[in-house]
Image: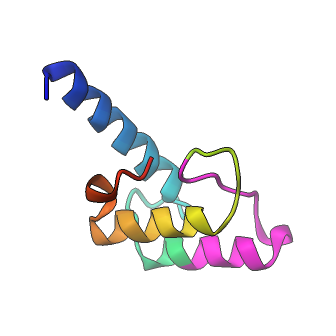
């Protein structure tokens, strides 16, 4: 990949990480997974978060957070 492609992937990953850090502590951790789960189960517990950028708030967002947490996001193409 060229420099532009690498830069674009790094920017996309930074955006995913920022979206997935629901607790605001600067890291994607199990606490973020728990927070997203709470928001999915009870919409009143917080604003919906479109972690994967597909325009929806659904189970795919939880999957995206789990992939970021386990380091698999770059291998699966999650956005």
Image check: 64 left or right of 1? right
| Residue located farthest toward the right when viewing the structure as drawn | 44
Residue placed most toward the observer, 59 or 31: 59
**Percent x, y for residue 25?**
45, 61
Q: Quadrant of residue 46?
A: bottom right
Percent of width and height locating residue 29: 40, 72
Task: Work out whether 73 lies above or below 8.
Answer: below
Residue 2, magenta (yes or no): no
Q: Residue at x 20, y 30 (%)?
A: 6
* Front-lying residue, 31 or 14: 14
List x then y, in percent, for residue 28. 40, 64
Question: Per the image, is 49 magenta?
Answer: yes
72 sits to left or right of 64: left
Residue at 50% over, 69% down? 63
Tell me the quarter of the image containing the N terminus. Answer: top left
Relative horizontal placement of residue 18, taking residue 61 as reference (left or right): left
Q: Which residues are magenta?
A: 34-52
Expressed as whole percent of the image width and height from the top left, the position of residue 31 reads: 49, 77
Q: How is the image coloured?
A: rainbow
Q: Is residue 13 left or right of residue 54?
A: left
Quadrant of residue 35 within the rendered picture: bottom right
In the image, 44 versus 74, the foreground residue is 74
**Total marks placed:** 0
**Where 66 falls versus 27 (above or below)?**
below
**Residue drawn at (30%, 72%), measured in percent from left and top?**
70
């Amino acid at each position: 990949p060229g420099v532009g492609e690498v830069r674009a992937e790094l920017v996309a990953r930074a955006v995913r990480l920022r979206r997935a850090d629901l607790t605001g502590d600067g890291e994607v951790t199990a606490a973020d997974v728990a927070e997203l789960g709470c928001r999915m189960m009870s919409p009143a517990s917080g604003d919906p978060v479109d972690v994967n950028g597909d325009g929806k708030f659904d189970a795919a967002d939880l999957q995206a957070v789990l992939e970021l947490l386990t380091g698999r996001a770059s291998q699966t193409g999650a956005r």
